[in-house]
Amino acid sequence: MNSKTKEEYYLANPLVRARRNYDMTGQRIFRLAIANLNPKLKNSEYYDEEFPTFHLSTDEVIAKFKGKTGNSHSIYDKLSVAAQNMVESSVRIGDIDSFIAFPVFDMIKFNSKDGLTVVFNRHMKPLLLNLEKGNYSRFYLQLAFELSSKYSLILLELILQFKGLQQYDKEKKCYVIERKLTPEELRFSLDVDEKKYKLTHDFIKYVIDPAIKEINKKTNYYIEPKYKIERGRYRKIKAFVFTMILPNADDEGQPKIKPKKENISAVNNTTVEDVPLLEIAPAEFPTIKTERQEEMPEPKARKRLEDFTKEEAYALARLLKFKVSEKVAFATCEKYGAKAINWAF
């Protein structure tokens, strides 16, 4: 069986919201196996009618899950714990009056000589294979390996599930998604037990805020840190409202390029609306330009990225990738213009 997986995977929307008691290793195995599938989508010419067996060789397993240490025995221990939780878990679809629950996997097998083998339960077909009715969402596999927290990964998927409802924000000059989730919905999907972080303040401090911070730092997506909180009677929180700024379509599936040490000062002056174009990690909580700032004339001597237009900033970012100094990059942009530089690339 070919172990090469695609760069993206598809989930039926009920499965995006479902609770899965997996650690981060389990979350990655789950998505790797799904990316191996060819689901039946609208107008699909080729698709899997039955679940293929997913296999990774031992070398591939170590390469995928080596982490910081790269110790093979540590990897095997993590796989063992993750596999045990995964085979014992089930998916529940429906509500109190009418529901169906079944195991996600028929088998997860690992041998240090042969590698990892995963087989889905046949009852998962409506959630992973038969998606032609259109009730599904698409995600990029790299997100599962860029992020280190399952809270970050699941929160990102929950928001991206509403990508079909994206709207253009004239003030930010980009497309945004707004997703409203109740505390109960968040706890359920993120697999945070009611007994854990009982106080809402602790739930926000230890789950939501760190997840947003990691998403903004490590991916091309940006969730506004100052999300809205809707309150009801006695100021009880009714819902969290998250606003996500989407990157350009060409950059969405690309890994974020981290800035060079010598360029950090310039990048920290970047604004939110520049993030998709720069392809460089922004500051953790970049500021949004106000109308007053937009109307201010450009200074004669432009010494920071924010002094340039979007097109010029994009050209500068490309020059900086080639270890050109900021001074040379700025002078080149002033002399030849952004169009000429981008055309040359």
Image (spheres, rainbow, N blue to C red):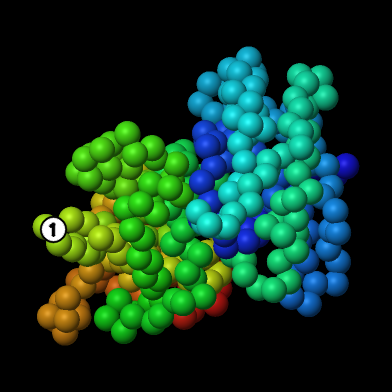
Q: Report the residue marked by disc 1.
A: 235
Which residue occupies the foreground of this view, 169 or 330? 169
**Where 291 falls versus 301 (above or below)?**
below
Numbered-mark total: 1
**Quadrant where the C terminus lies?**
bottom right
**Where 250 falls versus 168 (above or below)?**
above
Residue extending farthest top: 73
In the rendering, at what x and y percent does residue 165 appear? 46, 77
Residue extending farthest front: 97
In the rendering, at what x and y percent does residue 52 appear? 84, 47
Which residue is found at the position 76% from the left and 37% from the top?
106
**Quadrant where the N terminus lies?**
top right
Which residue occupies the foreground of this view, 169 or 250? 169
Which residue occupies the foreground of this view, 97 or 11? 97
Is residue 289 found left or right of 216 in the rendered image? left
Is residue 321 found left or right of 301 in the rendered image? right
Which residue is found at the position 53% from the left and 72% from the top?
249
In the rendering, at what x and y percent does residue 64 appear? 64, 35
Whether residue 140 can be seen here: no
Which residue occupies the foreground of this view, 332 or 42? 42
In the rendering, at what x and y percent does residue 179 appear? 38, 66
Is residue 330 found left or right of 164 in the rendered image? left
Which residue is found at the position 68% from the left and 41% from the top?
103
Q: Quadrant of residue 233?
A: bottom left
Which residue is found at the position 50% from the left and 54% from the top?
96
Q: Secondary structure at mark 1?
A: helix
Count neighbours of disc 1 (C-alpha within 10 A) and say few if under 14, some if 14 to 19, many if 20 or more: few
Q: At label 1, which amino acid type do we have?
A: Arg
